[in-house]
Amino acid sequence: SYELTQPPSVSVSPGQTARITCSGDALPKQYSYWYQQKSGQAPVLVIYKDTERPSGIPERFSGSSSGTSVTLTISGVQAEDEADYYCQSADISGSWVFGGGTKLTVL
Amino acid sequence: QLQLQESGPGLVKPSETLSLTCTVSGGSISSSSYYWGWIRQPPGKGLEWIGSFSYSGTTYYNPSLKSRVTISVDTSKNQFSLRFTSVTAADTAVFFCARRPYNGGFDNWGQGTMVTVSA
């Protein structure tokens, strides 16, 4: 079955830049999406179609794509950004898949 | 403002069928621009897409769960439901319902409902 691979954890100090990667063979052909999930809450969409930011999401959140990898970048990380982050995309057949998630720790 | 609310039993016995309903307010599930679906999250683990349906009536299921899952729709009540058969302890999870635009990500989620599979 198709998998999206994320690092289990990323740690940064406040004000620094956090980069979370997601890799998958179908990513060159399928859009990627990123979600932020804080403890005990439902996920929130922070990036869609690789690079687009929904209204209400701070400008410090951005997405990029290169080959079989996509990256969520959080510039000027704040304490409130500490959360789990999930990428999501589709396999060649159109079934939707989530990555395993990355725990962002703000030191 | 669109709201989604999951409902159903919080405890299901092994081998039985789990049934959940998602009630949508502030928008119509008959809209031609969206998919509606279910996602689950076992305690301490990641998200797993279960399945979705579109206005056209087409349903899509996670291939690994397809044999045990059925999603149905009641447009008169603006609700959709999940039926999950032959559950085991491994199916214990928080179940979310969510909306996805045709060209977007899951942009609206319910709060989630915890379902425990235990005798």
Image: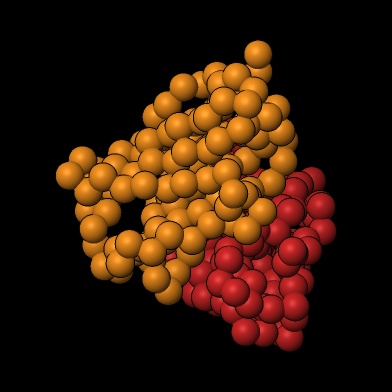
Chain colours: A red, B orange
Seen from this angle, which residue lies furthest left?
A: B76
Q: Is residue B3 visible?
A: no
Q: Is residue B109 left or right of residue A97?
A: left
**Residue B106 place in picture, x, y as percent:** 47, 58
Q: Is residue A99 visible?
A: yes
Residue for point 62% across, 84% down: A29
**Residue B72 place in picture, x, y as percent:** 36, 47
In which quarter of the view is residue A21 placed? bottom right
In the depicted view, which residue is nearer to us: B77 or B41?
B77
In the depicted view, which residue is nearer to us: B4 or B82?
B82
Q: Is residue B42 left or right of residue B38?
A: right
In the depicted view, which residue is nearer to us: A83 or A22?
A22
Residue for point 53% across, 61% down: A46
Residue for point 76% across, 71% down: A23
B115 to A25, vertically: above or below: above
**Residue B81 place in picture, x, y as percent:** 38, 41
**Residue A85 place in picture, x, y as percent:** 66, 54
Residue for point 53% across, 57% down: B61
B90 to A100, vertically: above or below: above
In the depicted view, which residue is nearer to us: A78 or B52?
B52
Q: Quadrant of the C terminus of chain B?
A: top right
Total labels: the figure holds: 0
B115 to B101, vertically: above or below: above
B113 to B66, vertically: above or below: above
